[in-house]
Image: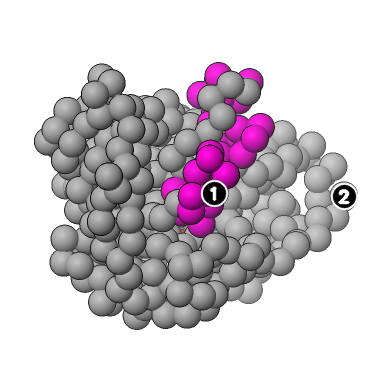
């Protein structure tokens, strides 16, 4: 029997989100049924509701930063029990056979990961629906265990914002002696500051105004730079070992590449609609690399959650009720979020 769910959905592209009732799949032997307590609002939710990437599937219930409690488990489930505090992130399945899946890099599955929402299950027809809802049914292999010592509302954003920064920081070896620049202090960026600081790196925030300096320092940033200030790009030329760009809007890559020192990298995680040109001269100077990175695999996401548990790292959040989602979207677009909106899904 399917499970009745209540959510907030966009009925069509660019429409405001509104209450919507729908069905979750009949739980299978390896499925975990999760009562959703909290869901973070990621800028990717807004890009997809507004059809800024590709044509989406509507009605769309966004949400891929999910924290909840296990309500029931299928007969074959071994990893979780009723009452466990768990999370679901950006994907809920993958082919499980290809080389990336076998390496625990399910986000780079050769057949494509199954997105938590705005996608279809691997049966090729059932639409997936996300975390702005009260309940979800997920295969146990794609469920994460939340640290016991962290508050669940502020932990939810780790499931996307946290892992999206942890993975490149870890891959490009952020740590003592490394100068790291985080571009954009929003949901992703503020997690990057906290995680890079806990990894022991020297962290700078590169923000497009002066407004967030005190917050950045309180999060562990060693330095704060307002990129709109005259002469910033000349003054800081060749300075950084690693820059991670989290900005949701277009940037001039060439200016930011100019900040990268010998053998350093600019890693992009922001996903604006437009293509951005790169000059070959920006890359060959200092033997620089320009790369991208997408969330993280299940094992690495668990590693990140455990790391955050150990270092007491959570997101700075504003907790809202579901009827405030549309207003929250407007504030995210204006860079007026301190630093992640999280929806109290039990108030639906
Ligand atoms: P967010 O909370 O809105 O943060 C984005 C930040 O970018 C803002 O706080 C602002 O920081 C800066 N910014 C915004 N507009 C700008 C502009 N016009 N010029 C310069 N800076 C601007 O968004 P988010 O949830 O962190 O997501 C950021 C991006 O990452 C989105 O495009 C999202 O889709 C993408 N994303 C990617 C992945 C992945 O796996 N790669 C995962 C999740 C999200 P300042 O005020 O400090 O400048
Ligand atoms: Zn996200």
Residue reaching furthest to the right:
280
Residue range of the region highlighted in magenta in the rendering:
99-127
**Residue 70's x, y, as percent?**
19, 38
Task: For the C terminus, give its image quadrant.
Answer: bottom left
Give the image quarter of residue 110: top right
Task: For the N terminus, give its image quadrant.
Answer: top left
Indicate whether residue 114 is drawn in magenta: yes
Provide the secondary structure element on which disc 2 rests: helix
Q: Residue at x 39, y 44 (%)?
A: 89
Which residue is disc 1 drawn over? 125
Categorize mark 2 by other alpha carbons within 10 Å: few (<14), some (14-19), many (20+). Answer: few
The mark found on residue 280 in the picture is 2
The span from disc 1 to disc 2 (Cα, nearest Å) is: 43 Å
For the question of whether residue 136 can be seen, the reply is no
Provide the secondary structure element on which disc 1 rests: loop
The correct choice, above or below, for 83 with respect to 272 in the image is above
**Residue 343's x, y, as percent?**
26, 63
Q: Earlier in the sequence, mark 1 or mark 2?
A: 1
Residue 321 left/right relative to 136: left
| 137 or 14: nearer the viewer | 137
Query: Is the CB of mark 2 within 8 Å of ligand 1?
Result: no
For the question of whether residue 28 can be seen, the reply is yes
- In this rendering, the label closer to the viewer, 1 or 2: 1
The correct choice, above or below, for 144 with respect to 96 in the image is below
Q: Residue at x 60, y 35 (%)?
A: 108
**Residue 92's x, y, as percent?**
43, 40
Q: Residue at x 39, y 55 (%)?
A: 130
Give the image quarter of residue 69: top left
| 266 or 303: nearer the viewer | 303
| 231 or 189: nearer the viewer | 189
Q: Residue at x 25, y 29 (%)?
A: 74
The answer to whether mark 1 and mark 2 are in CB contact below 8 A is no
């Amino acid at each position: 029997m399917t499970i009745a769910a209540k959510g907030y959905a966009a009925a069509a592209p660019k429409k405001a989100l509104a209450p919507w009732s729908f069905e979750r799949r009949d739980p299978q032997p390896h499925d975990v049924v999760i009562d959703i307590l909290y869901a973070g609002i990621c800028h990717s939710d807004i890009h997809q509701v507004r059809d800024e990437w590709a044509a989406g599937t509507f009605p769309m219930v966004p949400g891929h930063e999910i924290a909840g409690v296990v309500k029931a488990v299928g007969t074959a489930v071994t990893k979780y029990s009723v009452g466990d505090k768990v999370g679901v992130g950006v994907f809920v399945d993958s082919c499980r056979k290809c080389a990336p899946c076998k390496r625990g890099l399910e986000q780079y599955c050769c057949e494509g990961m199954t997105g938590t929402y705005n996608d279809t299950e691997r049966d090729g027809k059932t639409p997936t629906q996300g975390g702005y809802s009260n309940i979800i049914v997920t295969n146990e292999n794609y469920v994460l265990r939340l640290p016991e010592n962290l508050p669940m509302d502020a932990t939810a954003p780790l499931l996307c914002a946290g892992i999206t920064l942890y993975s490149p920081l870890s891959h490009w070896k952020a740590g003592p002696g490394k100068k790291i620049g985080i571009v954009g202090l929003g949901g992703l960026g503020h997690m990057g500051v906290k995680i890079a600081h806990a990894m022991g790196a020297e962290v700078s925030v590169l923000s497009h105004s002066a407004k967030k300096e005190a917050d950045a320092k309180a999060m562990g940033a060693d330095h704060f730079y307002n990129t709109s200030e005259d002469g910033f790009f000349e003054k800081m030329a060749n300075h950084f070992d690693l820059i991670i760009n989290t900005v949701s809007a277009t940037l001039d890559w060439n200016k930011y590449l100019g900040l990268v020192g010998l053998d350093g990298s600019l890693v992009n995680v922001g996903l604006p609609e437009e293509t951005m040109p790169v000059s070959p001269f920006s890359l060959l100077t200092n033997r620089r690399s320009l790369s991208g990175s997408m969330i993280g695999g299940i094992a690495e996401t668990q590693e990140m959650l455990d790391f955050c548990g150990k270092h007491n790292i959570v997101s700075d959040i504003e907790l809202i009720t579901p009827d405030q989602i549309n207003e929250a979207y407007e504030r995210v677009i204006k860079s007026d979020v301190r630093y992640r909106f999280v929806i109290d899904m039990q108030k639906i």
